[in-house]
Image (spheres, rainbow, N blue to C red):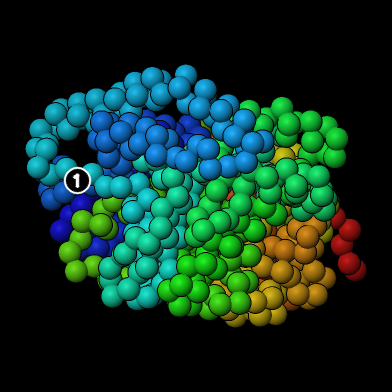
Amino acid sequence: MRILGISEFDNDAAAALLIDGKIIAAASEERFSRIKQHAGFPYKAIRWILEYAKLNLDDIDLIAIGKQPASIEVKNYIGAIKSFPWFHYEAPLKRKLLDFGIWFGRNIPKYYLYVHKQEKELKEWLKSNNIQQSKVRYTIHHEAHAATAYYFSGWDEALVITCDGQGLGETATAWAGKDGKLEKINSVKLPNSIGNFYGSVTKAIGFKPNRHEGKITGLAAYAPPSNEVDAFCQSISFFKDGSIHAPYIYGSFPEIRALIKKVGREAVAASFQKRLEEVVVQYIKYYLKKYSNKKVVLAGGVFANVKLNQRIAEIQEVEEAFIFPAMSDAGLAVGAAILQEENKIPKKLMDVYFGPDYSEKEIRAELEKNNVEYQKPKNLVTEVADKLADGRVVAIFQGRMEYGPRALGNRTVMYETVDPKVNDWLNKSLARSEFMPFAPVTLEKHAEECYVGIDKGRYTAKFMTMTFDCTDYMKKTSPAVVHVDGTARPQLIDRKTNQSYYDILNNYHALSGIPSLVNTSFNMHEEPIVCSPYDAIRAYNLGKLDYLALGPFILENKNGITFQRERKK
């Protein structure tokens, strides 16, 4: 069965091809359009997938859409609001809910026009390609999220939790996964949304909701929570009667901004992060106890919050946690497709290298086209490891591009972890926020030496989706990747997963004695991760990085601004 999955179009559009339940290709539209979190139909991603698989649309058995038709989308959205017990809450919160009601009334016509525009675009694409409607399958947003987490966890039995801003009027769901089947056990609906609760502080602090929530997570480590902000958060977000209660309070922006002015953005971020963790952990613990599951699998944009994921793994009843690597709406392409498979069973996800790759001939042609000097070393791995051990910054472009938001060795910038001062330098070079931490890649065989409690997240750490407390050894040898709260978000690598990437790190370890390197995504700030050789050359030049390992070739930036650290004699 050949199934083409398409994510919903208004947030991180993507496409994926599954053949007999196996992911053959998957990519976000942003990587091709170069528009961050591309909103719209994923024309280019679909075109690339068909070219890669040497198929045309007539060869596709089913087309699975990660959403419902427009009429159902609007009906469910309005239905969630209408069924909400508006007078269930105490007076202060009722006044805030009135603000939401006014906002909703003003914006529902805009939402109605938007989803109908999306549906028209889909219908025009189907018609222009002579695709019969009988080939099209619509799916439910949160069920598609749940499917990605469960069917790619490799665990036959698990508690499945989804959580995001909203999809089809739902904002969080709980499912019992067992014997290859998903049973829905809870649904949280608008206006309750812990995702939008976190989005509200993202906006109030001055960042963009649905994009910059990770900045709040990073910022939260720089100050303790404020008692006053804690009290405010507790008044508008809580767990009760098996459900999350967190009405998205649009009218609270002035109050949040007043708190920022009073106690500082770091303390406000810390309190909102703390409350997110408390509410979601309570939700999960409730259903863990009720269904006696020991493994938890997660999907949805809220679980891009790696610190929250650590708190979930730390729940005493949790044996292990897994987060689907493309946890955002980009993952709906895979989720919608896997739901169409018959007799599906959970399978372990070995890697997420599902994007484009480029031949040596194609890479050389791009180098020649751009009049770039390059060399082809006899042993690229040892060459790169030597340069890293010499304190150089090396961008890596190799193999198939990663699916999801994390760079995992094929579109990556690497450097040593020994001097935290390099973070300021590289953040400025890549035009990134100065307070954001960088993440390490660590040899899997050294995981226990570097991280506390790694066994609860060993599998998901292959995909850099969870933080862990760092050991004293890690803090001493790799301070550049240890955040101010003593945590790091590692990628664990073994040779079977990515041979050349592993060999670079393993050779570096032999030279330095340190089993970790910085792995940060290869892109300029507010741009998608690089996809093509052209993208790589451009970002390498703009970032003034020392070297670029582009396929089998090495480029040296003679005008680069190398970070000069104090070197031990």
Residue type at the position of mark 1: Arg
Residue depicted at x 48% and y 31%: 35
Residue 561 percent coordinates (x, y): 76, 42
Quarter-wise, where is residue 525 in the image? Answer: top right
Residue depicted at x 29% and y 25%: 116
Residue depicted at x 40% and y 58%: 186
324 left or right, relative to 395 = left
Q: Report if residue 379 is visible in the image.
A: no
Observer-nearest of 538 and 59: 59
41 left or right, relative to 566 = left
Quadrant into which the N terminus falls: bottom left
Observer-nearest of 320 and 419: 320
489 left or right, relative to 189 = right
Residue 92 percent coordinates (x, y): 66, 36
Secondary structure category for the residue under label 1: strand
392 to 154, vertically: above or below: above
288 left or right, relative to 525 = left
Residue depicted at x 24% and y 67%: 344
Residue that badge 1 annotates = 137
